[in-house]
Structures are given as structure tokens and as C-alpha cells.
Image (tube, rainbow, N blue to C red):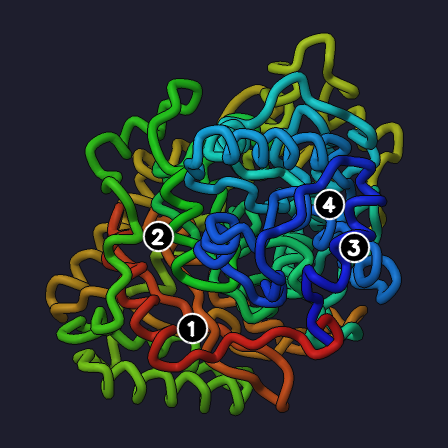
Amino acid sequence: MKIKIWLAFWGICFLSQTACQAPQKEAKFEVIETTIQEIHQAFQENHLSCQQLVEIYLHRIKKYDKATLLNAITAINPRARERARELDNEFRRTGKLRPLHGIAVVVKDNIETKDMPTTAGSEALKGFIPPDDAFIVRKLREAGAIILAKSNMAEWAFSPYITQSGTAGITRNPYDLNRVPAGSSGGTAAAVAANLVTVGLGTDTGNSVRGPSAHCCLVGLRPTLGLVSRDGIIPLYLRNDTAGPMCRTVEDVARLLDVIAGYDPADPLTALSQGKKPLSYTQFLDKNGLKGARIGVFRFYTDLPTADPQVVALFEKALEEMKKQGAIIVDPFTIPKFGELTKNIWCDTFRHDLNQYLRSLGDKAPIKNLLEVYNKGLFSLYIRHRLVKALDQPADKLLCQDVYHEPRNIALRQAVLRAMEEQKVDFIVYPTWNNPPRKLGDLRSPAGDNSQLIPPHTGFPAITVPMGFTYNHLPAGLQIVGRLFSEPELLKVAYAFEQATHHRRPPKKFK
């Protein structure tokens, strides 16, 4: 049954111990699958307040998160109700809404929040509350967002396959609680998919926004490297790391990107974004956005013998739908020497980057370095091999440059761009995963992660959009890749595909 505000209004006022002003009309606003625009319209029509919205989400978290073993949420903001009251008072006083006024956001547990713990899923940082917000969190708050909760993640963001932390345990997939939501931003994906919040933030080093979004029937964007600040994000490999929106609609991704994108002096890489951010990404949301777009079909992944036939079938249907919407399908799109160019392209900078981050905290750092984490046994057994591998790397010396200056990355980026130019391709498409979400504990069946090579190592942006369900209830995602800072065009074609297909639907057990 869908939660409706009118059913709980007076109880909410009592529980929140605040004075509530009754809406002028009977409220019929439904929280399930709601969008930023719909919430703001309800505010303007006096059908909803920030306080009411917060209480409804808190009720859903209490009802569904731990009780179902979903386990997406690691912490609730103790100031959420107070902030909601402040925003309600501001709206009554000014009659104006900020861009994300009252919107409930969940933030991955490796993004600093000054009012909630930030642990990166590690027991070594358990209870650690940073002195400041990450840059992108500060921008969200300035835009009126309520940071309602933090979400579970794979420990240190190590795993693209599972979301298991040393602080909160295992997160499950809301579409099948016996399956994984992928990693490492699986907590954010599960929370947004189950309608425990409005929108969310994840981080993506090689998969971690796009992979969980696809497994949970969401839209997830990995922005161009340098469009979004990394300041205040606990690093995995800083040279590949970025934050990105995870939402139920392309439009909400665009609205979130409007707020978090842009230059931050604390992250020099964001200087690349200057002059490249439009007034608003929402202006590019065009239902006819696929018309004339040249789509390159990268069959490097779908030709693999381990690709699930139902995923491949959905991909073929997606190509037909794009063609029906006026896209020009270039099939196949090939990148010469792709295997050779991507071989050994990863560079393990975790030890260096984490040590640098911990040093930046000064006396407030709960641990000094990665070696201390290992020596004290402050880790889950499933990541031990990753820690050992990281500790083989230099503690204070980088073995490779960033994505824009490392020769291996430059060679790959130039090869992809050359192939796109020669084959007259605007975008590259492939399934985000070749296989359905694995069952919990299954590390042997094919995972099918297709996100680890092109965007993280070229700096290119990529978006995943729902493309349907395999085996009746398991989500699958279509990944679309564009050139550097092509987010306006990327959102345009993703929106057109979304509006033509409407594959997103909520998980049945969380309605």
C-alpha cells in the first residue's frame, strides 16, 4: 500500500514534537517514486512540508531497512528534523524554494558529513565524524537538501560485486533480498530504489555508481573526471575516483548534477570544468533527444560466452527502441587493439592516497595510515588480499600520473576518440552488466561487470539507464558513454530512451 501523507499527518506532528501547520487541502501526495519536481510542486500547493516529508522517509527507513535485512542505511542525521523546520520557515517567509529545497538525500559513507560518521565501511574509522563537509555535501546543503542519512558500502570501496562493510555488514538487493545490489555504492542504490529517500550520491572508481544503479533499476551517472570535486571523499584510487548522482529518473540526475558540478579550489582537477558547465543540465532533457544521434554498439562485451542471453536480448531490444526513436545505430563499433590498450591499465594508489587523506585530518585522524589498519586487524577477512596488495605499493610515492597525464591513459583515450571519429559515432553503448545480480555469497558465477575499462581510464562520462528485467524481476541497465564533458548530450539521449521505454519500476516488497 502506498504511503499517503493524510494517513499519518497528525501522528507525524506528535512524533516530531514540533508545531505543524495543517495543509489547506487534503494531502494526496505519494512518496513512492516521487521526484524532486513533484515534491516542490507539493510544497508550493501546500500539500506537503519538509517536516512531513522527512517523517515519512524516517518511517519508511524504520519499517523497511533493518526489518527486511535490506540494510542500506548506516546512520540517520540527528539534525534532519531541525533542518526541515528551518526550511519550512524559510519557505513561509520568502515564498521561494532553493534548487533542492527539502529534498531528502542519502550520501555514501565515504563522503564526509560533519554531522554523521564517515567510515568508508571500515572498523578503523568507526564513529569518526569529520570536522567539515565534503565540498559536494556543502553544495547540497546550500541548495536546500536535507542530508537524511548515510549509506552502507563495500569496505574501503574495494568490491564492485558486493556491498559489505566492517561497520554495518551486508546490504541486499531490494528486488531480490537473496541477491547483491553490486558494489561499492550498493547502500545508496538500495535506499533510493526502495524509496527510503528521494535521491542519493555514490562514488565511482571503476563501477560503483553505474553498477549498483543498474542492479537496482536506477539511473546512475559517472561524470567526466574533473566535473565534480573529490575534496572530502575518502579515496580508493584518487586518479579514478569521482562522485555521481544515483536517482530514479534522468531528470533528477540532472537536477543533482546542477548542484554538485563545478570548480572547487580544493580539487585542482575541477579547473578543467570551468566554462564547460551549462546554466542547467535540465535544459537538455528532450524526449526527441535520440533523433539523429549516432550510437556505436560495442560488442566487445556482449560477444563474451559468459554473457547472459536474457541480458543480451534486452540489449538488442534497447537498440531497436533507440533506432525507433530516430537514432542511427553503428553496429558493431570497434576499438582497435582495445584488449592490448586496457591490459594492466589499473594503477593501485590506495595506500598513498589513503595515507595522504589521513594526514590531511591532522590530530583528528582516528588512525595514522593503512599499515596501522592492517597491523591492528581492523578489516573484514574478505578484503585482506586487497590490503596485502596495497601494502606492497609505496606509502609516499605515486607510481603513475592522473588519467589526463599518464601515457597509458592518454593512449586509450586517443584510441577511443579516434575510433569514434572514424566511425562517426557520438555515443558508445553496451550492457552495464552482462549478467543478473548474483546471489549472496556467490563469487563464482559470471559477474559480467562491463564498467571497469572505458570511462574510468579515459575520463569520459557514462550513464546507466534501466533497460528492463531478466528472469521477471532482476533489473538490467544500458550504459551510454560520451566524450569528455558531454554530459548535456549524454543526459539528452538517456532521457529520450527513458521516456520512450519507462522501464523503471519500484521493488514490490517496498511499496
Residue 451 appears at what percent x and percent y?
47, 61
* Crowd around label 3: few <14 · some 14–19 · many ≥20 (10 Å): some
| First of labels 2, 3 by sequence position | 3
Nearer the camera: disc 3 or disc 4? 3
Residue 177 appears at what percent x and percent y?
78, 72
Q: Are marks 1 and 2 in contact (CB under 8 Å)?
A: no
| First of labels 2, 4 by sequence position | 4
Q: Is residue 478 above or below residue 14?
A: below
Element carrying mark 2: loop
Using the image, tell me which numbered label, if any, was put on residue 59: 3
Disc 2 versus disc 4: distance between alpha carbons?
25 Å
- 212 or 376: nearer the viewer: 212
The residue at 42%/73% (across/down) is: 478
Q: Residue tagged by mark 1?
A: 478
Quadrant including the C terminus: bottom right
Q: Is residue 100 above or below residue 1?
A: above
Disc 1 versus disc 4: distance between alpha carbons?
27 Å
Q: Residue tagged by mark 2?
A: 461
Residue 5 appears at what percent x and percent y?
68, 60
| First of labels 3, 4 by sequence position | 3
- Residue type beneath disc 2: Pro
Using the image, tell me which numbered label, if any, was put on residue 155: 4
* Crowd around label 1: few <14 · some 14–19 · many ≥20 (10 Å): many
The residue at 61%/72% (across/down) is: 447
